Amino acid sequence: MRSGLAAGLMGIGWIFISFGAVIAVLYVFARQGGGDSAHLLPQMATLGVGSLVVGAVMFAAGYLLGRVGRSSDRASA
């Protein structure tokens, strides 16, 4: 059960990290292009950084939970 939860956290975290990276690329293009999207830049930056941070925290939590689960399984065996 624990390994499934760890894998799920890591998978969802990776999705958030990827989403934040896409927003970062869109932010760079919107910043260079100017035009109508210039007023959305602060919101894009906030959403991109937030997504990267949440994804990194979830990925790290899943990784650490997987490591703790493996070491406790080895100790009981």
Image (spheres, rainbow, N blue to C red):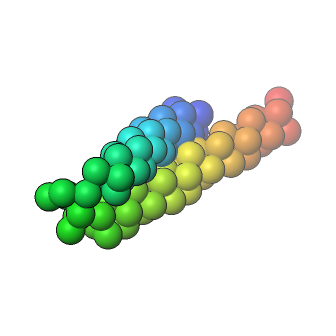
Q: Quadrant of residue 22?
A: top left
Instruction: Where is residue 36? Give x, y as percent.
Output: 14, 58
Q: Residue at x 21, y 68 (%)?
A: 39
Q: Is residue 64 or residue 68 the one in the foreground?
A: 64
Which is more toward the observer, 76 or 28? 28
Q: Position of residue 40 (x, y in %)?
A: 23, 64
Q: Is residue 47 left or right of residue 71?
A: left
The x, y position of residue 33, in whole percent, is 28, 51
Query: Residue 39, relative to residue 15: is it above or below?
Result: below
Locate residue 36 relative to residue 59 in the image: left or right: left
The answer to whether any part of residue 5 appears in the image is no
Taking 66 as reference, is 72 left or right?
right
**How far from the left and from the top, in percent, is residue 70?**
74, 36
Q: Quadrant of residue 74?
A: top right
Residue at x 44% of width, y 39% of height:
18
Nearer to us in this view, 53 or 48: 48
- The answer to whether residue 77 is visible is yes
Residue in view at x 41 percent, y 44 percent = 25
**How many numbered badges does the structure rendering display?**
0
Q: Quadrant of the C terminus?
A: top right
Q: Which residue lies most toward the left here?
A: 36
